[in-house]
Amino acid sequence: MNAVDVLVCVLGVVIIVATFRDLIATVITTQRDRRWSVARRFYRVTWRWYSSWARRIHDLDARERALVPYGPVSFVGLLAVWVACLVFGWGLVWWGLQSRMDGIDDVVSGVYFSGVTFLTIGYGDIVAAGDLERVLAVIEGLMGILTTALVIGLLLNAPGIHKSAYNKPAGWQREVALALTGPLAGISHALLLDRPREGVQALVGRSGSDEIDTDLGLPVAATAPKPRAAVTTSGTTPKPKPTPPHPRKPAFSPKKKLRIWIAGDSLVITPGYAIVRAAGSSPAMEPVGTVDGRVATGLTRPDVFNWFDEIRRQVKELRPNVVVLAFGGNDDKAYMTGLPEGTSTGDFGSWAWRKEYGRRVGGVMDTINRAGAFAIWIGLPQTRSPDQTRRFDVVNAVAEKQARKRPGRAAYVDTYTTFAGDDGGFTQYLPDGSGRLEKVRADDGVHFERDGGDIIARIVLKELNKVFDLTSWRRQQKS
């Protein structure tokens, strides 16, 4: 072998490794976020062309019908591109090894031998002469079989892959993934290839985990009627209604403890455990369940995790008196799932977006109230990113408004100003009671440190003491 043959072999190996790695990453992990990816480039080019053609169809139904074939056709096209790249890469390897192969004298014969080997046809007109070449021929044949197995595995796991595609952020990649995986999931179901996956999920207690649940179980917001003007008789002044007396606070004691459940996204985890520690030190309070903090979830994407169902289920099972919530860290996006039919939210922060998000926040609070519990909503803090802070402002305004609509049933805890620095902006350190600086915010500029969680816990306990009688049992015990 001369230097040119070695260079050709190296080039072939690079093409083989890059293509097969992309095939595995796309089919098994469904990730295409690398800079160089056959699948990424293929779909970016084909979807741009296909969607621009479809947009020329003015009739929406006809446009939708035209887009349907893109999924299965594009997958067949991508598979053909993968196979072509692998066959060509191996063809370069065989061409570089032509001095040790009987019957290969140019790139065409090298690609021909690669093709019949990859597809496990093996006519026998070209024979590997040395041991190394025979081993490589077996490896290529196995790669061809493995490629077929990966495609079959894709069909077996199509329902889960389709759900992963549905859960992607809004954008062209999600649209392409849905167009591809939707028909595959349909084919998998029609051929009963999804039954083994369903059986395994049933064995491990995860039945239905591939279902895409976007049902919020909330009433559609209706426009509230305008209040009627008060009608008075000419020359008379209406008597003011007497102010009703303040209702007595519900009392709790060591014998009848205040039950607290904590849930939300990742921002609730550190404050949640601080509340658990603080409640655990009080004889009249009792945390129930675990701190249900779930990363990368929220109220805008029930398809990722349906908090509406989770909260309904937990308040029924745990029967808490208080539910502490923290949502919004992942809700600062325009895209929402589970919208009522015919509803659109527009851009993030628009009137329609605020109305729909308010419906969800209010719906969660009402679910808690109907279960006989008080809702405490922990607002979002300032972050190191000014853009993210501005988005959090929008989310906070909606949540605070919904809490104010429910006096005596919900309270809003402001962390935005609580964790502000001297200049009113983001700070990672705040002085404690003795003036010593303590680290209250994590290094990511978003989450809380333990000391920050303790600050929130004290505020939450203060709110609880406003609503509930947690101390009179001490006086009764002394008397």
Image (cartoon, rainbow, N blue to C red):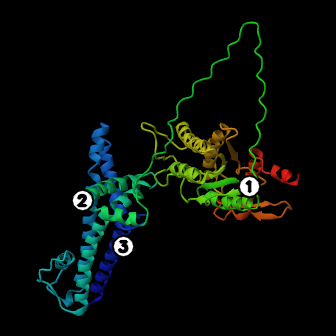
Badge 2 local density, few (<14 within 10 Å), some, or many (20+)?
A: few
Task: Tell me the residue that label 3 is attached to.
Answer: 21
Which callout, 1 or 3, points at the residue further toward the start of the chain?
3
Q: Quadrant of the N terminus?
A: bottom left
- Which secondary structure lies at badge 3? helix
Of badges 2 and 3, nearer the viewer stands 2
Q: Residue at x 51, y 46 (%)?
A: 334
Of badges 1 and 3, nearer the viewer stands 1
Q: Position of residue 427 (x, y in %)?
A: 73, 58
Is the C-beta separation of discs 1 and 3 under 8 Å?
no
Residue farthest to the top? Answer: 234
Which callout, 2 or 1, points at the residue further toward the start of the chain?
2
Badge 3 local density, few (<14 within 10 Å), some, or many (20+)?
A: few
Q: Is residue 379 visible?
A: no
Q: Residue at x 52, y 48 (%)?
A: 308
Would you say 109 lies left or right of 230 here? left
Circle 1: residue type? Lys
